[in-house]
Amino acid sequence: MLAVSAASYHFLKGASKSQEKLAPADGSKTPALPGSTNQKVQGLQLDPGKNYGNKYASGILPVGDNKYVTDTAKQGYVFACSTYAQNLKTSAGGAGTRGPWFIGTTQYDLNKKAHVQGSVMWNSEFSDQISGGIRTVITNDLPTHQTGVFPISAADPAYAYDKNPNRIVGQVFTYNLTAQPSYGSPQCIGGQVGIMLTGVALFSGFDAGGRDAGAWEVQDSCSGHPEKTGTYHYHTLSSCIKDISVKTVIGYALDGFPITGPKLGDNNILTTSDLDECHGLTSQVVLDGKNATTYHYVMTQDFPYSVSCYRDTPTQPPGQQAPADRQTHTGA
């Protein structure tokens, strides 16, 4: 029997979404959002009094195959560095077969998607500390939640669509992120875009071949799977992250800005169309135990799911080579 389940971040249908307000284009100071001590607000702002609706309450999502640009950032697209874009053009994707959860070629039903079977628990190691303006995150990349069994067994119904041969392997990852990121013009991304507080790496919304990973690849019940080096990772909002409030920090992008969930309240869920070209906005969040008004990325139900370009210069993820067309933080 095919193993399926609805993602925990689907909600009942609600009212239609509304539009946010923009900060002045000249970068001048604007009033802080309620409850914040910050005085400068930059970029697209969340309107906490509005109902943005629940556009994807049905679980039927758009497919984002090949939705990337290389010249300038664009809402709903990944702004890919040239080397990353070239890899997306020439590499093969992970899944071998379009699953029965697809609705034609432009939509898929997340509620009908297969998941890798199994419930394996791991000894997760994770720390997050700030010193000298640097946030140091150390993780073994083993999650705080269960995973499926990898490699995917031939006896698992998911094997019919995705024969992922990789196994989960503990890593030694240290991320040196700026603790005081500066909002700026969009910068291109590579394959990994962040680190989540579950200890798990966050990859872009694409599989290796530029297809929508959330639509094509079969992950486990927590929305994760391993790549060829054994690194367990997400492409989409993990269904095992339970607090997905827009105020709750659930990870950090490689440029140091926080990542939050999309939920303002029941029937009030942010989607890609509510965010800027980097998949973020400015609002009040709880950052390191304190209320702060800051720019942050939002993980949504729909493609591109998370960070689609950077607002500050990113650090290089452990064990990966920097794109030739971008400078990176060294953490020094």
Image (tube, rainbow, N blue to C red):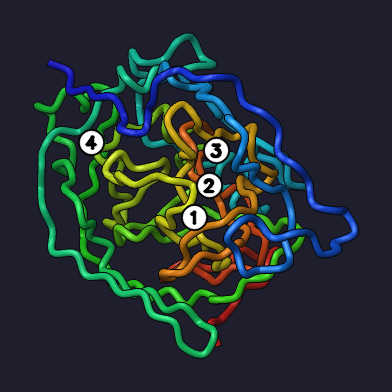
Q: Residues within 10 Å of mark 2 (few under 14, many from 20)?
A: many
Q: Is residue 301 left or right of residue 282?
A: left
Front position among marks 3 and 2 = 2
Q: Is residue 27 above or below residue 319?
A: above
Q: In the image, what residue occupies the spot 40% across and 55% down?
A: 250
Which mark is nearer the camera, 1 or 3?
Answer: 1
Q: How many marks?
A: 4
Q: Earlier in the sequence, mark 3 or mark 4?
A: 4
Q: Which residue is mark 1?
A: 259
Who comes first in sequence, dot 4 or dot 1?
A: 4
View extreme (top): residue: 104
Q: Mark 2 and mark 1 in contact? Answer it, CB < 8 Å.
A: yes
Side of 219 where 31 appears, left or right: right
Secondary structure under tag 3 reads loop
Identify the secondary structure beneath mark 2.
Answer: strand
Q: Nearer the viewer, residue 229 or 20?
A: 20
- In the image, what residue type sits under mark 2? Val
Three-letter code, disc 3? Pro
Closest to the observer: 207 or 252?
252
User: Sequence order check: which comes first, mark 2 or mark 1?
Assistant: 1
Q: Which mark is residue 172?
A: none
* Spot occupied by residue 86 in the image (x, y as percentages of width and height): 62, 47
Disc 4 residue crowd, few under 14, some 14–19, many 20+, Cα 10 Å: many
Q: How far is the residue under mark 4 from the one under mark 2?
A: 21 Å
Label drawn at residue 304: 3
